Image: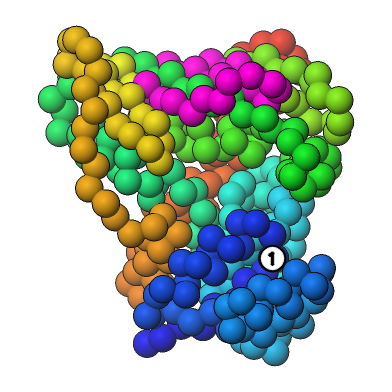
Amino acid sequence: MKYRAAIVGGGGIAVGHLEALAGMDRIECVAVADVQEERAQKLASTYGIRPYVQYKEMIEREKPDIAVITLPHFLHKEAAVFCAEQGCHVLLEKPMALNTEECDEIIAAVRRSKVTLLVGHTQHYIAENREAKRIMEQNWLGELVMIIDARHTNYFQAQRPRWFLQKELAGGGILTNLGSHSVDKIQWLGGAPIARVRAAVSYEAAEGNVEGSGLVFLENNNGVPATVSQSGYGGAPKDETELIFTKGMIKLHTGQSLWISEGGTYVQVPVEPQEAPFVLQFNDLLNCIETGAEPECSMEYSRSIVAVIQSIYRSHELKEEQTVPM
């Protein structure tokens, strides 16, 4: 069977999905919708698909099998519920929604409609991360004792769409957007959900009302501690995750390189090439549609990441450790 897909939202991330779909045999992209008509028309012309301004009209007219939702965060719930109720399977960009209450509404709509929804937590599909996970499962580095994740970038750069800097539209700043990746990576590689957090964040940007940095201490259900440090102000860029074991260490430069220490200097590990992460996501979604299996990035798993992010903000506000609600 060949599936028909439609893209809901024509921002920068939509291009990644369109590129992936253009090279796939089992999914054909038929349309894209964006409130900026010129952007929708440009994407449609580039990829040989039909443009729409209103996504609901597109879904009703095209009746795609799969809706790929790449809208701003505050529209995730509305679009996911609508597409599910129209009978579409859904690939929803992360974070799943602004809060766990919205996540619960999406879950209920998907269950009622008996469709499949996968949330696009791309950390699970990146070659270096997958190789690190494979090595960890072999257990030759011993017991995992801690995870250290650091990510620094110019978050307030001019080309970033301005809705990212409005809390009511984005849900938060760097910790919502990039922190979701860090929490996902820690939960997935650590093999257990986050149970407790303690956090301090800053609001020092010249624009917007979202945080620009955060330092977070987390502990998972197995008692493994982790830290996340993120800064969106000026400075040297960094994206590095270290996993410390009783017999060695792993260092991840996600999307770039993988390193291992067995008690001495880090040595780079070769990583086999693989299909693009977005292609792997679509393949995962197709498998779940056809077999009825639950996606690895399931709705419940993705809701747990939103719950951790909410707890981070609550910890900062109350100046105390928070237990992450189930």
Whether residue 238 appears in magenta in the rendering, the answer is yes
Q: Is residue 267 left or right of residue 82?
A: left
Front one among 197 and 246: 246
| Residue at the spot 47% in from the left edge and 23% down from the top edge | 149
Position of residue 152 relative to residue 45, above or below, is above
The residue type indicated by label 1 comes to: Gly
Q: Which residue is depicted at the point 41% across and 73% down? A: 23
Quarter of the image where one finds residue 291? bottom left
Dot 1: element: loop
Residue denoted by label 1: 10
Q: Quadrant of the C terminus?
A: top right
Residue 91: image location, x then y, percent: 54, 64
Q: Residue at left 33%, top 24%? A: 251
Q: Quadrant of residue 187?
A: top left
On whether residue 43 falls in the magenta region, the answer is no
- In the rendered structure, the answer to whether residue 167 lies left or right of residue 252 reads right
Q: 63 and 123: which one is in front?
A: 123
Q: Position of residue 268 (x, y in %)?
A: 24, 28
Relative placement, left or right, of 136 versus 101 is left
The crowding category of the residue bearing disc 1, from other C-alpha atoms within 10 Å (few below 14, some 14 to 19, many at least 20), is many
Query: What stretch of residues is rendered in magenta?
Result: 213-242
Q: Vertically, is 210 above or below 319?
A: below
